[in-house]
Amino acid sequence: MKFKKAIATFTFGFFIGSLGTYALTEKNLDAMRTDMKKLNGEISRIKEIIEPFEQVKKFTVKVTGYSNDSGSINVPEWQDGLTATGTIASKGTIAADWDIFKQRTNLYVPDYGIGTVVDRGSKVKGHHIDIFFDSREEALKWGVRKMEILMAER
């Protein structure tokens, strides 16, 4: 019986990732259940947004971060917090080249979430998107990433 438990423990740790051997305790199981609920919530939220759309496309793009400051926005009159479409920039605001991603397009960006293209930038051209952060520090922490994103079309 101990051998079967050891195999189950090792197998469980192997499938979870790089955890290696993992002791199953009620506390660990509760933490994993909580994490699974969060992930299931995120998956459900993404499905709700994407399901009404006819098609989902994948794009590989350069993703940068910006905030409402002079380091991110180089034209002083554009530092008023409003996007090019007149909305207030907040989490989920995405700037893009409107020749590639039309206004009001919904995009899913891994490690960021779902956002909507409601802004554009003088340096945001081609397959490049700029995602909004509340602070310059968060935008700089994001850095520059080349990644696959999802676009939902009606």
Image: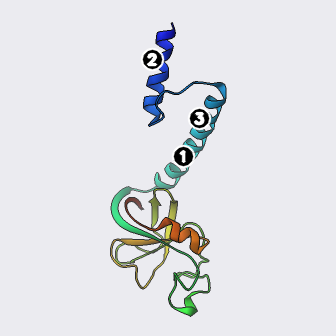
Depth check: give the residue in front, 47 or 66: 66
Q: Is residue 72 positioned above or below 5 on the image?
A: below
- Identified at 59% across, 78% down, the residue is 87
- In the rendered image, which residue does mark 2 sit on? 7
* Mark nearer the viewer, 3 or 1: 3
- The number of callouts visible is 3
User: Which numbered disc flags the more N-terminal residue, 2 or 1?
Assistant: 2
Q: Secondary structure at mark 3?
A: helix
The colour scheme used to paint the residues is rainbow
State how far apart marks 3 and 1 are (Cα): 18 Å
Depth check: give the residue in front, 23 or 30: 23
- Identified at 62% across, 31% down, the residue is 28
- In the rendered image, which residue does mark 1 sit on? 44
User: Which numbered disc flags the more N-terminal residue, 3 or 2?
Assistant: 2
Residue 76 visible in image: yes
C-beta proximity under 8 Å, tags 3 and 2:
no
